[in-house]
Image (spheres, helix red, strand yellow):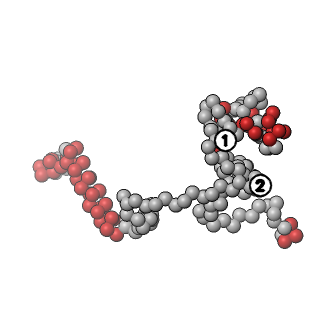
Amino acid sequence: MRGQDHPGLKRFRSPVAGALLGGLLVFVCGAIYAQNAPQIVPRVTGAAAPMGDVPAPPLARPITDDKRLMRNYPEQPPIIPHSIDNYQLTLKTNRCLDCHRRQFTEGSGAPMISVTHFMDRDGQVLADVTPRRYFCTACHVQQNDAQPLVPSTFKDMLLVDPEKK
């Protein structure tokens, strides 16, 4: 008869029974998929055992020839062309500013900090480096002899021969 519950189905209408049936269905489907799932993502640990001791690769040596390299893209922060080992960068001390601050560039021969480093969020020019640009190594990295992690075919548009176009 229409509108009447079948007496044998009442036990399956409780929320707990529905949750159990749903969980069982998800578990079974997951087990079936796990057996046939493709291994798309490589292991992060590589070939070594996950908890094994793997020696760290040596750090790349810093290049200290003081030659400034061309940037790889227009807004790239300049790379630091000298060693910054043991440079102190704290809230009270920034050794970079000993040479790169406006008043010290003439004596040190270092390039002056960009004027953008003196602007606050509202574009107002301050007398000293803005706090959000104070920690230089947040953007600038030391130049070193490390090999690129991925190959690149990037060509700077200034180096492209205009006659070959």
Determine the residue located farthest toward the top in the rendered image: 127
Q: Amino acid type of disc 1? A: Cys
Instruction: Using residue 158 as the reference point, say whether residue 12 is left or right of it.
Output: left
Determine the residue located farthest toward the bottom in the rendered image: 164
Secondary structure found at label 1: helix
Instruction: Using residue 65 as the reference point, say whether residue 31 is left or right of it.
Output: left
Q: Earlier in the sequence, mark 2 or mark 1?
A: 2
Is 59 situated above or below 96? below
Q: CB atoms at circles 2 and 1 under 8 Å apart? A: no
Residue 124 makes an appearance in the image: no
Could you give the CA–CA distance between mark 2 and mark 1, rounded to whole angstroms? 19 Å
Between 39 and 120, which is closer to the camera in this rendering? Answer: 120
Quadrant position of residue 119: top right
Q: Which residue is mark 1?
A: 136
Write the residue at 43% across / 61% down.
54
Give how far across and how far down residue 7 sits, in percent: 11, 49
Quadrant position of residue 69: bottom right
Instruction: Using residue 28 as the reference point, say whether residue 162 is left or right of it.
Output: right
Instruction: Name the mark nearer the viewer: 2 or 1.
Output: 2
Q: Amino acid type of disc 2? A: Lys
Instruction: Using residue 124 as the reference point, say whether residue 150 is left or right of it.
Output: left
Give how far across and how far down residue 104 sits, in percent: 79, 36
Residue 59 makes an appearance in the image: yes
Q: Which residue is mark 2?
A: 67
